């Protein structure tokens, strides 16, 4: 083997996968065509999911805090896994409190305006693709006055605490009442002195005159988490993107 | 070829000794700082693993949050230990094989210090929650160009040495080293540009980072480990490599399959479908180079079982090669389409990564360290027992981690797929295996405290002044504190 043949061999064996796996798909996916709503849809024009700046910041914090180690954000098609049918990971099922089944696989637009898609490394905790909608549903069913952000902040402060994610069994849901194994993110909260009603602090009992105040990072992270919904803005997806499976009913 | 051959040309001896002298500071620097980083990485790994089954552990320190400490653990392991050990092996092996002294030890040493500072800065930023937030490339974006510059300043001399070598046969190890030296900058620059500089689709950013992680192992760490094995196996046994053709086949099969690895993490994500499956296919096909190289090296040393038992370098290398074959077989089992459903998001991937990083790369690197350090310090290893403890605890620890993580991971994956069970039950069941992993990390910690201490003593020039290498035999026929050996006469000859 001559040196020249060696170098040409290396260029070929590495260059082809480099082009096919990295350069070409990267360039193609930089300029995806917008998807139009179909003729049967009530909505017109292109489907453009948008998120504001704080949510984008929250996405970055999600990565920096290492949440993606235990939480995935991808609903795989059924050939690759049962994610669509697992609880409310992929969307809400039709039930007495839900008008329409919104479950679907992840689509390319779900990560719009994030710097990086948090696919995740393991599923030590549940998938978060539909976290925002799940919390909303939970609060609605339990007739809670909290906003989803408040619930998310409480959960970040103390995942094992009071606001556990439980949906009543009567609601034809798979009950996901289990003790969270998520470590508390106490670094995202400040302990401050409070006067009066303690505006902006979390409703937790600690020593007299003190309160727990979420930092800006915690607020951004909570905004991001509650923005994770499979039915973005409550709007239906264009037909071309929607995949709404006929799910098997959970075993009794 | 054999260094112990008493008829070796004295000029050769002088040349070898002057090459060793010219490189002694940078190589020792990379090995010792790598050893310290490895110990640190294992402590972080212990904490990260404990947090998976006991989330309340050390929650008082927010910089030790589970996700951050895990990222810091892997980064310290790869960039602190893995790449630095690789640098030490590359610069020494390339100089020896090209038969050229190193004339830039000072530059390499400075670059090495900068590399350590950059890795330290990166790890601290990760733990402060100020990393890049990109899985598998967690260092902040400014760290990567510094690492690339240091890499160039460290390895460019090895390329030059290869270029100006006396014409002649190019040895197998040199193919691997040369290829690794060219692949790494290509991979790293591509990843840095596509992940941090360009504004790509978030999914492709994730994909490129996953590809970076996959190819960093298959096209840099692995080739360096294989180069070291191809050097040590014939060198220590005094026999030529079993088959040149198998070596050639093993090299090119890795070159063909290796670059596709990494994107299997994205199965089911809305990316072009062939990307993750190309990654999975490449991981399955890696069995081919694993068997080719493993078989070739094992055939070279087999029949000399006494040497394998005696020589620390060879024992580590042979164990690394056996684990490489295990890695290949496991890779086939874990990356088939039905298995990917279970393994994609379970603990399994972690166990598999540790098998590659520790079981294959690190064991081969330890073998190289045990061979190189006595030659550059002109001292022999102090304690046979330390080496034995290092070997036994390493092998036991890494096997336990892999077994617990893979079996626990498959159980975990099955649980998530089984819709008749609530998710929490499965996560709890998997966490039982986490205890096993944590316990196994303590064995690796013990192993590496022995290694690190031993290496630091050698670095402090407290090794035995003897011409008799430290072997793992029970009864050493010679006085372990033997007389001044001929190693010293090399230096007077070169002066």
Image: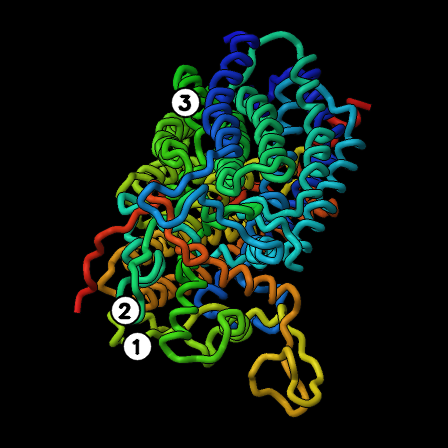
Q: Is the N terminus of chain B in the top left, top right, bottom left or bottom right quadrant?
A: top right
Q: Residues within 10 Å of mark 3 (few under 14, many from 20)?
A: some
Cα gap from disc 2 to disc 3, whole angstroms: 51 Å
Tell me the SS state at disc 1: loop
Q: Is the C terminus of chain B in the top left, top right, bottom left or bottom right quadrant?
A: top right
Q: Are marks 2 and 1 in contact (CB under 8 Å)?
A: yes
Tell me the SS state at disc 2: loop
Residue at which label 1 appears: A168
Residue at which label 2 appears: A173
Query: Which chain does the numbered disc 3 sit on?
Result: B
Residue A25 point in image, percent of width and height = 47, 30
Q: Nearer the viewer, mark 1 or mark 3?
A: 1
Residue A96 point in image, percent of width and height = 26, 71
Is B68 placed left or right of B207 in the picture? right
Q: Residues within 10 Å of mark 2 (few under 14, many from 20)?
A: some
Cα gap from disc 2 to disc 1, whole angstroms: 8 Å
């Amino acid at each position: 083997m001559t040196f020249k043949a060696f170098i040409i061999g290396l260029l070929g064996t590495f260059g082809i996968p480099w082009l096919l796996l990295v350069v070409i798909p990267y360039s193609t996916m930089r300029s995806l065509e917008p998807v139009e709503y179909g003729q049967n849809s009530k909505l017109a024009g292109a489907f453009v999911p948008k998120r504001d700046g704080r949510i984008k910041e929250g996405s970055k914090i999600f990565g920096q805090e290492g949440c993606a180690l235990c939480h995935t954000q991808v609903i795989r098609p059924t050939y690759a896994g049962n994610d669509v049918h697992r609880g409310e990971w992929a969307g809400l099922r039709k039930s007495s409190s839900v008008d329409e089944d919104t479950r679907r696989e992840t689509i390319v637009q779900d990560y719009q305006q994030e710097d990086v898609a948090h696919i995740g490394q393991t599923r030590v905790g549940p998938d978060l693709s539909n976290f925002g909608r799940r919390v909303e549903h939970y609060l609605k069913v339990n007739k809670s006055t909290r906003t989803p952000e408040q619930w998310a902040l409480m959960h970040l402060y103390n995942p094992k605490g009071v606001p556990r994610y439980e949906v009543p069994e009567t609601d034809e849901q798979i009950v996901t009442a289990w003790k969270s194994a998520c470590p508390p993110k106490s670094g995202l909260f400040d302990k401050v002195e409070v006067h009066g009603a303690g505006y902006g602090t979390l409703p937790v009992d600690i020593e007299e005159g003190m309160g727990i105040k979420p930092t800006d990072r915690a607020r951004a992270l909570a905004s991001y988490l509650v923005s994770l919904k499979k039915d973005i803005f409550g709007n239906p997806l264009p037909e071309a993107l929607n995949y709404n499976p006929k799910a098997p009913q959970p075993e009794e | 070829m054999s260094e112990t051959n008493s008829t070796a040309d004295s000029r050769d001896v002088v040349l070898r000794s002057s090459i060793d002298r010219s490189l002694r500071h940078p190589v020792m620097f990379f090995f010792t700082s790598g050893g310290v980083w490895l110990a640190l990485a294992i402590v972080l790994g212990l904490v990260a693993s404990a947090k998976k089954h006991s989330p309340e552990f050390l929650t008082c320190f927010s910089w030790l949050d589970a996700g951050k400490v895990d990222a810091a653990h892997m980064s310290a392991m790869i960039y602190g230990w893995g790449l630095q050990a690789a640098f030490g092996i590359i610069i020494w092996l390339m100089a020896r094989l090209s038969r050229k002294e190193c004339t830039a030890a000072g530059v390499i040493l400075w670059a090495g210090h900068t590399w350590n500072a950059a890795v330290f800065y990166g790890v601290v930023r990760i733990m402060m929650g100020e990393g890049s937030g990109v899985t598998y490339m967690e260092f902040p974006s400014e760290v990567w160009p510094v690492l690339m510059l240091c890499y160039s300043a460290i390895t460019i001399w090895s390329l030059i040495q290869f270029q100006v070598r006396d014409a002649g046969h190019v040895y197998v190890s040199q193919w691997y080293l040369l290829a690794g030296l060219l692949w790494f900058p290509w991979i790293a620059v591509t990843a840095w540009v596509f992940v941090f500089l360009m504004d790509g689709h978030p999914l492709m950013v994730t994909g490129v980072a996953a590809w970076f992680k996959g190819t960093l192992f298959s096209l840099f760490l692995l080739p360096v480990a294989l180069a070291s094995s191809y050097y040590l196996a014939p060198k220590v046994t005094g026999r030529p490599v079993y088959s040149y053709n198998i070596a050639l086949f093993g090299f090119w099969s890795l070159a063909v399959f290796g670059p596709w690895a990494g994107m299997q993490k994205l199965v089911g994500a809305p990316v072009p479908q062939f990307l993750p499956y190309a990654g999975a296919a490449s991981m399955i096909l890696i069995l081919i180079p694993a068997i080719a190289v493993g078989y070739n090296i094992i055939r070279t040393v087999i029949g000399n079982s006494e040497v394998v038992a005696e020589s620390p370098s060879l024992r580590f290398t042979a164990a690394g090669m056996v684990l490489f074959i295990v890695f290949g077989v496991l890779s086939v089992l874990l990356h088939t389409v039905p298995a990917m459903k279970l393994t994609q998001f379970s603990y399994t991937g972690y166990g598999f990564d540790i098998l590659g990083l520790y079981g294959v790369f690190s064991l081969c690197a330890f073998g190289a360290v045990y061979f190189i350090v006595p030659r550059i310090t002109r001292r022999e290893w102090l304690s046979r027992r330390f080496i034995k403890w290092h070997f036994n605890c390493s092998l036991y620890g890494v096997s336990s981690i892999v077994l617990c993580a893979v079996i626990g991971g498959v159980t975990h994956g099955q649980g998530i797929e089984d819709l008749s069970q609530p998710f929490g039950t499965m996560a709890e069941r998997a966490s039982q295996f986490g205890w096993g992993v944590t316990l196994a990390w303590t064995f690796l910690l013990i192993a590496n405290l022995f290694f690190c201490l031993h290496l630091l003593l050698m670095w402090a020039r407290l090794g035995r002044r003897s011409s008799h290498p430290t072997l793992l035999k029970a009864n050493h026929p010679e006085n372990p504190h033997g007389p001044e050996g001929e190693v010293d006469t090399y230096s007077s000859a070169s002066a």
